[in-house]
């Protein structure tokens, strides 16, 4: 072990116990796990959509833009209560490529 360099670059023997510079400290004993229950919801958003409410979710994002980054105005946003809204409309004579999709994550206790 004397030839091994620790993560701080010091050429000294590595002692993983004292001092314990690992954070968070390593878990010992019985391993625990948490079951994370979640669902997703997908919404197809047509052209000429203004401030359409798609409900309460933990997070939402565009998942299929159908050429939209090059045409029109697309927006997905939320308010302080995790209510999510979308826009998809023409902008300066440019329009989206058609129906686009938003996928939302639903988590327990996240306003859902």
Image: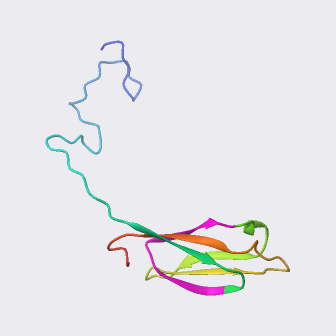
- Residue 48, compared with residue 14, is above or below; it is below
Residue 109 picture quarter: bottom left
Residue placed most toward the observer, 101 or 110:
101
Residue 23 painted magenta: no
Residue placed most toward the observer, 4 or 66:
66
In the rendered image, the residue lying farthest to the left is 29
- Residue 13, compared with residue 46, is above or below; it is above
Relative to 57, is 92 on the left or the right?
A: right
Q: Position of residue 60 (x, y in %)?
A: 52, 71
Residue 97 picture quarter: bottom right
Q: Residue at x 31, y 13 (%)?
A: 2
Q: Position of residue 86 (x, y in %)?
A: 60, 80
Residue placed most toward the observer, 41 or 50:
41
Classified by dominant secondary structure, the portion drawn in magenta counts as strand
Residue 59 painted magenta: yes
Which quadrant is the C terminus positioned in? bottom left
Q: Which residues, given as a range, are shown in magenta?
A: 50-65
Q: Residue at x 21, y 30 (%)?
A: 17
Q: Residue at x 71, y 67 (%)?
A: 66
Q: Position of residue 58 (x, y in %)?
A: 43, 72
Q: Position of residue 101 (x, y in %)?
A: 61, 71
Residue 52 picture quarter: bottom right
Which quadrant is the N terminus positioned in? top left
Relative to 38, is 84 on the left or the right?
A: right
Relative to 17, is 100 on the left or the right?
A: right
In the rendered image, the residue lying farthest to the top is 3
């Amino acid at each position: 072990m004397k030839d091994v360099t620790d993560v701080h670059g010091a050429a000294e023997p590595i002692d993983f116990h004292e001092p314990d510079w690992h954070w968070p400290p390593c878990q010992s004993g019985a391993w625990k796990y948490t079951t994370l229950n979640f669902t997703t919801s997908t919404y197809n958003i047509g052209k000429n959509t203004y401030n359409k409410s798609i409900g309460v979710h933990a997070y939402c994002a565009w998942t299929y833009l159908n050429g939209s980054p090059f045409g029109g105005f697309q927006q997905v946003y939320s308010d302080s209560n995790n209510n999510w809204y979308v826009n998809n409309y023409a902008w300066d004579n440019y329009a989206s490529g058609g129906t686009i999709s938003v996928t939302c994550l639903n988590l327990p206790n996240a306003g859902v």
